[in-house]
Amino acid sequence: MKTLFVIAWRNIWRNPGRSGVLLMAVVAGLWAGVVTVGTMNGMLNQRVDYLIDSEIAHAQIHNPEFLLERRPYDYIPEFDKLVEILESDQRVAGFAPRVLADGMLQSPVKTAGVRIRGIDITKETQTTSFHENLVDGQYLDSDIRNAVFVGQRLLESHKLRIGNRLVLTFEDVNGDLTSAAFTISGSFQSASSDYDESHVFVRVTDLLPLLSPDSEVYHEVAVRLHDIALSDEFVRDISAQITGVKAQTWNQISPELSTLVELGGVMLHIVTLIIMLALAFGILNTMLMAIFERLREIGMLLSIGMSRAKVFLLIMLESVVLTLTGAVTGIILALISIRRFAETGINFEMFADGIASLGWDHVVYPVLSTQEFAGIIVIVIVITMLSSLYPAIKAMRQNPLEVEK
Amino acid sequence: MKNHIIKTENISKTYNPDTVPVHALKAVNLEFSKGEFTSIVGPSGSGKTTLLNMLGGLDKPTEGHVEVDGVKITGMKDSKLIEFRLQNIGFVFQHYNLIPVFTAKENVSFIMLLQKRSKKEMEHRAEELLNKVGLGDRMDARPKQMSGGQQQRVAVARALASEPKFILADEPTANLDTSSAMNLLDIMEKMNKEQGITFIFSTHDQRVIDRARRVITMVDGQVHTDEIHKESSSTITENDSQRIDTE
C-alpha cells in the first residue's frame, strides 16, 4: 500500500501543470464554497438569534383567539396564575408580559398603520435585548409622560424628531376607538427597516389605562428560558397547566425562522455538492487523460503481474490523493478565513439598505458547525470516490496487450 | 519424462471470426526447453508476436492450448493468469516500458514487491541484477535520464528479478543502435550461457537471429522452419564482458 501511495503521488506530479491546475481548482472551489456557506450560515444564524433575542424569546403565551384575529379583548385568561407558574418554574430565566394593539399613528405629516407594543420595561429588559437597538434619545425608562419609542425610519418618514408628539389611535377592549398623544423619547434601529417603520413601543403603564381602564390585561407573555433546548418541554407543561392559553416555542411562533435554520443546513450541502460535482468532471477529465496517456504502461503492469485490483487501487489513489490534497487545503484555508471573519465580520455596507429592508444585518459573522464541517468532508470524499471510479475501472479493464501498441 | 518448459498444442488464433476472419496463427505445435536461446522470426504479419503473446499468456488462442511447466495456462482465470505470469514469466518489451516515476533500482524492485519479497531481499537482488547488466552506477537514475540501451538493460534486469522460468522478449533491439543492441545481446547471451536462463525472442533483427541457437521461422501464421544452430555465430569474449561492464 505504501508503495502504491508513492507511485500514485509521483504519478500525480508527472504532469505538474495539469495536476496543479486541478489542485488549484479544488482548493479555490472548496475555499469559496465553504466561506460562502459559512457566510450564509452566519447571516441566517444572526437573523434567528436576533429575532429570538430582541423580540420573540424562546416561547410565547397567548389567548389562542388573539392569534387568529388580534382583537384587544382576546387577552390571556388567568394571568395571575400564569405569573405564579412562571415565577416558580426553574427553567424560566425571565418573562415579559405585553399589551398589544394594532392602530394608527398620526403625525403632522401623515398617518400610517402601526403595531403598538405596551411593555413592562424592567421585565422586557430581562427577557429581550430590544432596548439595545436605541440609536437616539432615551429608551422608555425616561421621565417623559406617555413616552413612545419609535423606529428611526418611521421618524424620518414622518419627519419627526425626538421630543415631538404623535397621536396613537386604537381599539380598546370594549371595541371603542381611543386616542392619545405620546411624546417621542427615543428612536431605535433594528435589523429590519420594515419593522422599524411599523412598530412603536410604549410603557404598559401608559397603554393599559387607555386600552383597558377597568382591569389589567395582557395579550402576550414572552418567556426566556435558561436553555433554548427546553422550549418544547416548557410549552407542553404550560399548555397542560393552564386552560385557555396557547404556549408556543420560538419556531412555532415564527416557522420561517426554523425554516431558515433548516435552509442553512440544506444550502450548505447543496452548495458543496454543486461545487464538488463541477470539480468531479475536472477530476474525471484529468484522470481519463492521465490514463489514456499511460495505456501502454498499464498494459505493462498487467503483463508483468500486477493484479487488476492493484491497478484499480493505484488509479483510485491518484484521484483521491490529488483531490483530497486540494480539498483539505481548501477547507483549511476556508476555516482560517471563517475564523478570521468570525472575529472581524464581513461588512456588506454597500448593500446595507437592501439587506436591512430584508431584515438582515449588513455585518455578517460566518460560522460553520462541526456537524456541517463533517457533512462537507463526507460530500467531498463521496464525490471524489465516485468521480475516480470510472477512470479506475477503465484502467483496470485494460488489455495487457496495450503494452505492445 | 518431459524436458520442455513450454508446449503449444495446435494453437490457432483468428481475429474477427464473424466478420473478416484474419488467421494470425494456424495450428502451431511447438516445444521449448529450459536454457534455450531462441528467436521467432518472420515478416510482419507472420504471427510471431501473436505466438509470443500466447506463450506469455497475454493473449488466448481461439483453438488449442499452451502449457507452461506442465500447467495449462489456456482457459486459466484472468486473475490466476496474472499471478502465474508474475511468478513464472519475464517480459522484455520493444519500448522498454519502465515506470517513468521510478528509479532504475525501484523499477527492478517493483516486480519483487508484487511477489511480496522482503525489502532486504529486493534491495540486494535489484543491486545485484543492475550490476550484472552494467548499470551499477545508474541505480538512482530515472528512465528519462538513461539512454535507450540502458533502459532496455533495466528492463532485462526487471524481467530477471522475479526469477522467471523463461523470458519473452518482443523485438528487444528494435529501438536500439548497433552498439546498444550488441551490448544488450551480450548480456542476455551471457546470462543464458552462464545461468541457463531461457530467452525466447520475437524479432526480425538479424543481429538477434545470428546469436540464437534455435530459429523458428513463421510464415502466414504457421511454423515454416524450426532450425537448431549448434553454436551461435558470435560467442562471448573477454572483450564483450568488458563492454557489458563499461557501457
Image: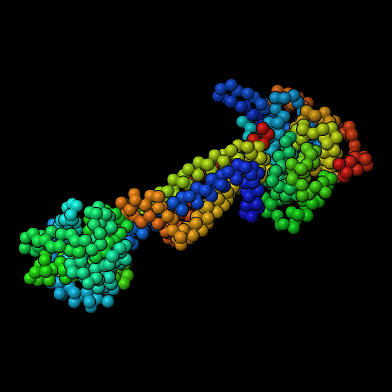
Q: Return the residue nearer the eye: A7 or B123.
A: A7
Above-or-below relation of A93 to A219: below
Q: Nearer the viewer, residue B110 or A259?
A: A259
What colour-coding does the image apply?
A: rainbow
Q: Position of residue A73 (x, y in %)?
A: 10, 63
Choose top left, top right, bottom left or bottom right for residue A142. bottom left
Tell me if residue B238 comes above or below residue A341 in the rendering: above
The outermost residue toward the right is B238
Residue at the location (72% across, 36% down)? B95
Q: In the picture, residue A215 is in which quadrant?
A: bottom left
Q: Residue at x 46, y 58 (%)?
A: A341
Where's the C terminus of chain B, which quadrant? Answer: top right
Identify the residue at image location x=8%, y=69%. Answer: A213
> From the viewer's perspective, is B104 left or right of A324?
right
| Above or below for A271 versus B29 | below
Q: Residue at position x 55%, y 54% from top? A: A329
In the orientation shown, which residue stands out farthest toward the bottom? Answer: A88
Quadrant occupied by the N terminus of chain B: top right
Percent coordinates x, y for residue A10 in the rendering: 65, 48
Instruction: Please say whether residue A285 is visible from this viewpoint.
Output: yes
Residue B117, position as x, y percentages in the image = 70, 55
Marks counted in the figure total 0
Q: Position of residue A148 (x, y in %)?
A: 21, 64
Residue A252 visible: no
Task: Name the residue nearer the viewer: A353 or B202.
Answer: A353
| In the image: residue A361, left or right of residue A33 | left
